[in-house]
Amino acid sequence: MIEFVALVVTYGTVKRKENLISTIQSALTQGANKVFVLSNGVQYDIDLVLTSEFNNKVQLIKYEENLGSAAGFTGGLREIFNCKEISDDTFILILDDDVNVEPNFLTNLTNLEKSQSNTHVWSMLRLGRDHTFDDKTDKSINYYFNSIAGFTLKSRLFPLKKERENPSIAKMIFAPWAGIVLQKKLLKDIVLPTSDYFVYEDDSQFCLNLRKKNIQILKSNSLLLSEISNSWFEDKNKNSGYKIFYESKNDDQLGRFLYMIRNNVYLIRENKLVTNNLVYIFNILIFVVFGFLTYGNFHFKSFERLKLIIGAINDGWQGKLGKNVKWKL
């Protein structure tokens, strides 16, 4: 019988407490032996909350300040890897603090594992947002060559996808941290992302590191997550991150978009996904100009934000990573 533990990374104020409790409870309900919670600079008494709600079923890993998702998820994985009580065959389910594990997780994972002989990890399907199974094709690595934030002119005009061998099992190039399911023993060979990413694209680096070890990322429509809250890059009206970036009335949340852009530029260049510098620069130019013309409206504030995007691209190009104190999250 498959056994698994869960890793939940949380941060922020007491407003996130109820979602965190729901996430932990969903993992335990679906059969987790233990839930490791990494507190990334949480601003309330999380020790008291976890003790009163879950007694000894949760193990807390506490960082006094928010060191970012890169340090949070990799730190949590290292803690589990070094835990001698957890066998190498145990699975690790990685979660954000605002998702729920849907019913029949353990049964479905057990059945899926029986059907696979290759070395792999799973990426769970996010209900309502993940459209992987809307068609029967998967993106190839070529789709991301010379791309910025997933955009290339070539892939827009001629999508580089291939027919799925098994309609119910997708093969992914990238997947978010939340919903990754892997056996502990795989961590022996995988290089974990540098904490210099701080936030965003650290999960993409992890996926590329899996790929370098010939470990596939698989997705099934029977391993499901439901989300409790909206992501930063889409509001209640499902507006895009670019639109929110340019039309936001204050600067408090601009950093998320800037970190994503900066880190993506670094990721693509560092992992040799730039095959033609001229094409890459052309794609960046189209991406930047299109975003400005579509959402900038030529206001003074928009020009200031355009400069921020160009600066973020330059930082990524130069490999200037880490926390930027000017970028608010």
Image: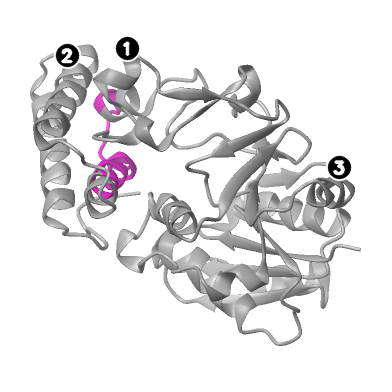
Q: Quadrant of residue 233?
A: top left
Residue 119, position as x, y percentages in the image: 64, 57
Around disc 1, counting alpha carbons within 10 Å, would you say few (fewer than 14), some (14 to 19), or many (20 or more)?
few
Describe residue 73's horizontal placement relative to residue 85 as left or right.
left
| Residue type at the position of mark 2 | Leu
Report which residue position mark 3 lands on. 103
Q: Secondary structure at mark 3?
A: loop
Describe residue 298's horizontal placement relative to residue 290 as left or right.
left
Q: Secondary structure at mark 1?
A: helix
Report which residue position mark 2 lands on. 293
Around disc 3, counting alpha carbons within 10 Å, would you say few (fewer than 14), some (14 to 19), or many (20 or more)?
some
Q: Nearer the viewer, residue 41 or 37?
A: 37
Q: Secondary structure at mark 2?
A: helix
Q: Quadrant of residue 49?
A: bottom right
Residue segment shown in magenta? 246-264
| Residue type at the position of mark 3 | Pro
Residue found at x 27% / y 33%: 147
| Quadrant the N terminus occupies | bottom right
Whichever of labels 3 and 1 marks the residue nearer the N terminus, that label is 3
Q: Magenta stretch containing residue 237, yes or no?
A: no
Q: Are marks 1 and 2 in contact (CB under 8 Å)?
A: no
Residue found at x 82% / y 63%: 32
Q: Quadrant of residue 155?
A: top left
Q: Nearer the viewer, mark 3 or mark 2?
A: 3
Residue 227 seen in render: no
Whichever of labels 3 and 2 marks the residue nearer the N terminus, that label is 3
Whichever of labels 1 and 2 marks the residue nearer the N terminus, that label is 1
| Residue type at the position of mark 1 | Leu
Report which residue position mark 1 lands on. 157
